[in-house]
Amino acid sequence: MLRLTKVNKYYRVGTHSLHVLRDIDFEVEDGEFVAIMGSSGSGKSTLLNILGILDDYDSGEYRLGDTIIRDLSESRAAHFRNRLIGFVFQSFNLLPFKTALENVALPLYYQGVARRKRNQIAMGFLERVGLRDWADHTPSEMSGGQKQRVAIARALIGKPRLILADEPTGALDSETSAQIMELMSEINRSGITVLIVTHDPEVAARCQRTIRLKDGKVMSPEAAAAAAAAASHPGMRAAT
Ligand code: ADP
Ligand code: MG
């Protein structure tokens, strides 16, 4: 599905250069369900934005399917994003004055699909996330978990092969978070590759494997195992 080879990314802040991703190397196969973990500032969102072709990188290679994603024109980038990728964010990113149905249908609006048709398709996706009865409600009338379901339905409507989620449960309580992860697992079982950035070990535990970042690098398997053990047995931390 995708492969990163020695990817580096710098942010230029004034005369200063910040090296945020360092020789990132990994591969994700079709149909995988992967967590990306790491402390705040370790480069997770930067990495996800590169994977989603929302941001560029400075060296190395990012291959998505058969295509090397490098210096694409905005229209080519948009073409890949719209055809292959669905995004889910911590803060849902719904339009506040649009109904759930209109929010889900939005990608089809941009594709020029007629209103009746796009509403019919959007209703099918709302049903899939369990919100058929909420179609006419606006985000302010919905709970966090419901808003995230709307956002997930919107991400699915373009029939993506890859879902990229940046802390999708970061604003939710643990029970709602578990429900959203159940929905993510179901989406993955339907054949869509899913990558989730998370701080939460319980979210990562529901994925098939975890890629850990530290200071912009992928941690070695040994270091990652030690970090995972420390996270699941907080009392052991002093001993390591
Ligand atoms: P994470 O998502 O793991 O918290 P980020 O990818 O958001 O980390 O950020 C990684 C580092 O890059 C941080 O030090 C952050 O301050 C810096 N950074 C992120 N975005 C920008 C930007 N647009 N300009 C400059 N520095 C940035
Ligand atoms: Mg982040």
Image (cartoon, grey):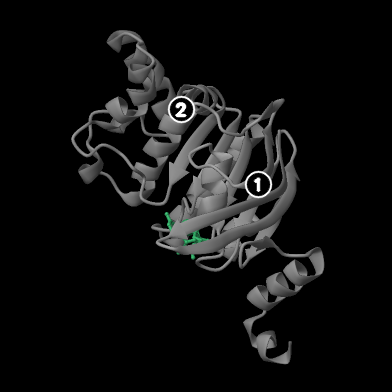
Quickly name the residue at label 1.
59
Label drawn at residue 73? none
Name the residue type under label 2: Glu
- Residue at the farthest right position: 222
Query: Which quarter of the picture shows residue 14?
Result: bottom left
Q: Which residue is mark 2?
A: 74
Camera-near label (1 vs 2) is 1
Seen at 80% across and 64% down, the residue is 221
Crowding near the residue tagged with mark 1, few <14, some 14–19, many ≥20 C-alpha atoms within 10 Å? some
Instruction: Decide: few, some or many residues near mark 2? Use Cα within 10 Å; few <14, some 14-19, many ≥20.
Output: few
Q: Is residue 128 left or right of residue 139?
A: right
Q: Quadrant of the C terminus?
A: bottom right
Instruction: Find residue 232 and report its horizontal and vertical position in percent.
Output: 66, 74
Query: x, y percentage for residue 205?
Result: 65, 58
Q: Is residue 100 left or right of residue 158?
A: left
Work out whether 28 lies above or below 128.
below
Residue 129 at least partly seen = no
Upstream in the sequence, badge 1 or badge 2? Answer: 1
User: Residue 120 is drawn in which quadrant?
Assistant: top left
Q: CA distance from mark 1 to mark 2?
A: 19 Å
Q: Toward the viewer: 7 or 52?
A: 7
Label 1 SS: strand
